[in-house]
Amino acid sequence: MGEPFRRTHARVKCDRPVGILSGAASGRRIAEARLLNISLVGAYVLVGRELQRGTAYRLVLETPDGPLEIACRVARAGPAGPHGRHYGLVFNMTVDPERRLRGVLDLLARHAPTAKEERLERTLRDYWSS
């Protein structure tokens, strides 16, 4: 059996609204999404519309220093559900966005929910969705 898959950068769990823009350099906002986790090399999002695998997009994340746009592409698409589809994004990072993203990751990691808070959130979500 092969080696288990290991991530090179730790992912930070979160649940934040983000925007998805078309194109790598310019384009219009095509979707709103939920950012579920993020690292220096990629993110996992829930999007209410279809994105194309391999296509260039930009993820727009609100930060204390203003919006942060990160060039990315869809690496993986999960099954469609009632609230949209989960996508794995891979970033095409340049120096300035990487510096700003490191600051955002630090803030998110400091404010990450505890395991107890995650269980409570899951319980409440299950209660209200039934």
Image (cartoon, rainbow, N blue to C red):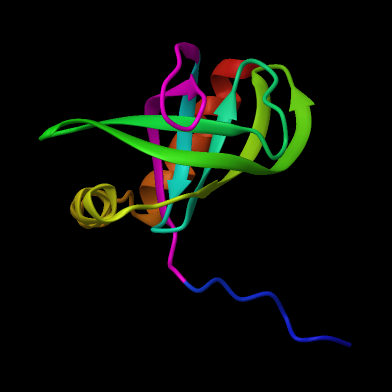
Whether residue 5 sits left or right of residue 34 in the image: it is right
Q: In which quarter of the image is residue 85?
A: top right
Whether residue 37 sits left or right of residue 99 in the image: it is right
Residue located farthest toward the left when viewing the structure as drawn:
65
Q: Quadrant of residue 78?
A: top right
- Image quadrant in which the N terminus is located: bottom right
Query: Taking 22 as reference, is 56 above or below it?
Result: below
Is residue 20 found inside the magenta-colored segment of the image? yes
- Image quadrant in which the C terminus is located: top right
Residue at 74% x, 23% y: name it.
Answer: 81
Q: Looking at the picture, how far across and down is residue 13, in whole percent? A: 42, 50
Q: Looking at the picture, how far across and down is residue 27, in whole percent? A: 45, 16
Q: Looking at the picture, how far across and down is residue 54, in whole percent? A: 69, 40
Query: Taking 43 as reference, is 60 above or below it?
Result: above
Residue located farthest toward the right when viewing the structure as drawn:
1
Magenta part of the protein: which range?
9-30
Whether residue 1 sits left or right of residue 7 in the image: it is right
Q: Quadrant of residue 114?
A: bottom left
Residue at 33% x, 49% y: name it.
Answer: 113
Q: How many labels does the image show?
A: 0
Is residue 17 found inside the magenta-colored segment of the image? yes
